[in-house]
Amino acid sequence: RGKSMTSEELAAGVVVVDRDPPSGPRFLVILDRFGRWALPKGHLDPGETAVEAAEREVLEETGVRTRAGEKIGTIRYSFWRGGLLRRKRVDYYLGDYLGGDVRPAPGEVARVRWVGPDEFLDSVDYPGNRPIYLAALDMVTRAELEKGRTR
């Protein structure tokens, strides 16, 4: 048998949450270069961990600093590039907003914006990402409830 014509690219992203606004938690979403709302993510550089890549990509794509924490899950999908079928694996983490001014990366990201929980779920333009959005929302909601109990 010959070698497979596929390779798996590794990437990582963060669902960035700002937990402190008066109106409640808000989430960071990007309008990607394909005109679809998505989460900031990108490839791992050599020697970089998934968490390091995820934090770097958020800063590069959005101007926002984050600390990636608990892993939310993994998305896998395939696409064609250069006549080869490519497989991509993206690990997503929940990350807290640490600061920075929102500014989209020219040529990569058209827009960056903060959205509330309802709009966050409505912004899923890639159906395969829906489980990540739902799990992140559940994790943030649970954390808010726990915080409320300790006050």
Image (tube, grey):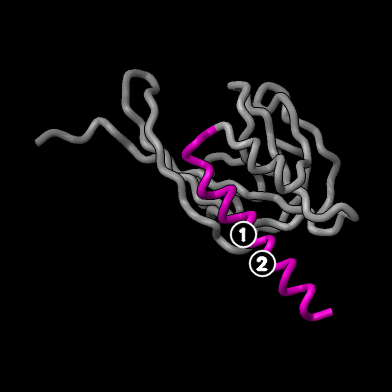
Secondary structure under the numbered disc 1 in the rendered image:
helix
Quarter placement of the C terminus: bottom right
Residue at image mark 1:
138
Report if the CB atoms under discs 1 and 2 are less than 8 Å apart. Answer: yes
Question: Which residue does the image show at 71% across and 24% down from the upper left?
Answer: 110
Which quadrant would residue 149 be assigned to in this image?
bottom right
Residue 39 belongs to magenta span: no
Residue at image mark 2:
142
Question: Observer-nearest residue: 29 or 50?
Answer: 29
Quarter placement of the N terminus: top left
Secondary structure under the numbered disc 2 in the rendered image:
helix
Tell me the kind of residue under disc 1: Asp
Real-space CA distance between mark 1 and mark 2, rounded to the nearest whole angstrom: 6 Å
Residue 149 belongs to magenta span: yes
Question: Residue 117, position in %: x, y?
Answer: 71, 48
Which quadrant would residue 107 be assigned to in this image?
top right
The magenta-colored residue range is 126-151
Identify the disc placed on residue 59.
none
Question: Image height check: is 131 above or below 37?
Answer: below
Classified by dominant secondary structure, the portion drawn in magenta counts as helix
Residue at the front extreme of this rendering: 118
Tell me the kind of residue under disc 2: Arg
Question: Observer-nearest residue: 80 or 120?
Answer: 120
